[in-house]
Amino acid sequence: MTQGRAGAGSSVTPPRELFEILAKPSGPVLCLGHVHPDGDVLGTLLGLGLALGAAGSSVTFAGPHPVPGVLSFLPGSDRWQVWTTAPGHFDVIVMTDCPNSDRSEGLLEGARGPASRVLNIDHHPDNRRYGTIDWIDPSAAATGEMVFDLVRALGLTITPAVALNLFTAIHTDTGSFRYSNTTPRTFRIAAELTAAGADPALVSDRLYQQRARDSLVQLGSVLRRVEVSPDGQVAWLTVPRDFVSREFVESEDLVSYPRSVGRVKVALLLREEAPGTIKVSLRGKGDVPVNEIAHRFGGGGHENAAGCTLSGTLEEATAALLQAVRESMGTARP
Ligand code: AMP
Ligand code: MN
Ligand code: MN
């Protein structure tokens, strides 16, 4: 796929074929999300879809799971549909931030007809290239950076609603511009989005300053469960099912707490999603590529942020993960 860089940290050119399809969509466009949608997938799909809609396209937004309450401030999120099966085929299907088609829970297969063009726009290095056109840029901190360049290249208007969506995509994937994926390009795009009407204070307020009082009680009980290895390099948090509410777990970035302990190189969050199903989030700080650990369990992600799902009890999953982390650290780069 041809993809040009106009210079370090400046804008990136989307592949010509992708540009041409979106410049003149011939029919309905489906913006399709991945499981448990986060700020990057929602912000990019809503931002691009609203911009295409304003230019005259018929756009549908859908995914296998609803918009979490904490992200319901995103403009256009009231149009998000939750599907168990796709209602029919679409001419153009845009998927963003989605490394493999399994993460649409079968919706991509249902919406994809013989003539459909699937546009796979992502920044995961392990993207499985399931699109008709795959535009993958692992150097982007968030898919939001890529979609900003795309919207610009298409000459679409960046309204305040589009800007707020794209800004939130970048804000969430960079941990509020704190993680090592944050680059000059990130700040340049964030500055342009702010100038176009995204309000950084509003985003921080909606994401972090709207907790229910009860959340602090739940946070207190969860934080007591953080464990740290004797050498201080691994920290983990296990959350049994029904220990706290699902809403609470989904609205808090719980893995950031074990990650925040000094000297920790790998942080884990293991939560029992259903009896016998353990969802794991892994975070690194540049020393250990945690996506390699996630791959061993059929998951994936970025070097410093990855995930996987295991079968078994919380104790079994914790033991398996800690063993894998130890093995990786033995061979980790110095
Ligand atoms: P999370 O810990 O769920 O916030 O996910 C961190 C990163 O890992 C995100 O970029 C996800 O796309 C990716 N990821 C999480 N779970 C999986 C999985 N089961 N398979 C592939 N990638 C995953
Ligand atoms: Mn995502
Ligand atoms: Mn992302």
Image (cartoon, rainbow, N blue to C red):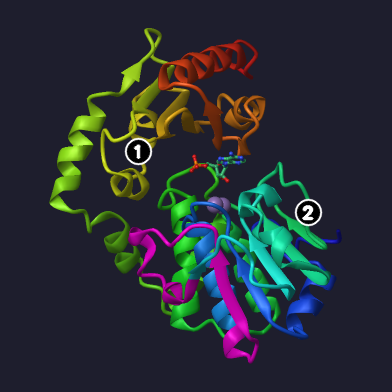
Could one spot residue 14 in this view of the protein? no
* Residue to which mark 1 is pinned: 254
Residue at x-position 82% and y-position 63%: 132
The residue shown at (60%, 58%) is: 143
Amino acid type, mark 1: Leu
Residue 197 drawn at (x, y percent): 41, 79
> CB under 8 Å between callouts 2 and 1?
no
Image position of 257 with respect to 26: above or below? above
Q: Label 1: few (<14), some or many (≥20) within 10 Å?
A: many
Disc 2 and disc 1: Cα gap in Å? 31 Å
Query: At numbered mark 1, what does the secondary structure look like: helix, strand or loop?
Result: loop
Q: Residue 208 in the image: x percent, y percent?
A: 28, 54
Asked if residue 56 is among those painted magenta in the image, a careful observer would answer: yes
196 versus 309 height, above or below: below
Q: Quadrant of the C terminus?
A: top right
The kind of residue tagged 2 is Tyr
Q: Nearer the viewer, mark 2 or mark 1?
A: 2
Q: Judge left or right: residue 75 versus residue 330.
A: left
Task: Magenta stretch: give its range.
Answer: 53-80
Q: Residues within 10 Å of mark 2 (few under 14, many from 20)?
A: some
Q: Quadrant of ligand 1?
A: top right
Q: Residue furthest top?
A: 230
- Percent from the top left, x then y, of residue 127? 72, 47
Q: Label 2, on which residue?
A: 130
Q: Position of residue 148 (x, y in %)?
A: 60, 70
On screen, residue 119 above or below 76: above
Q: Ligand 1 near label 2 (Cβ, under 8 Å)?
A: no
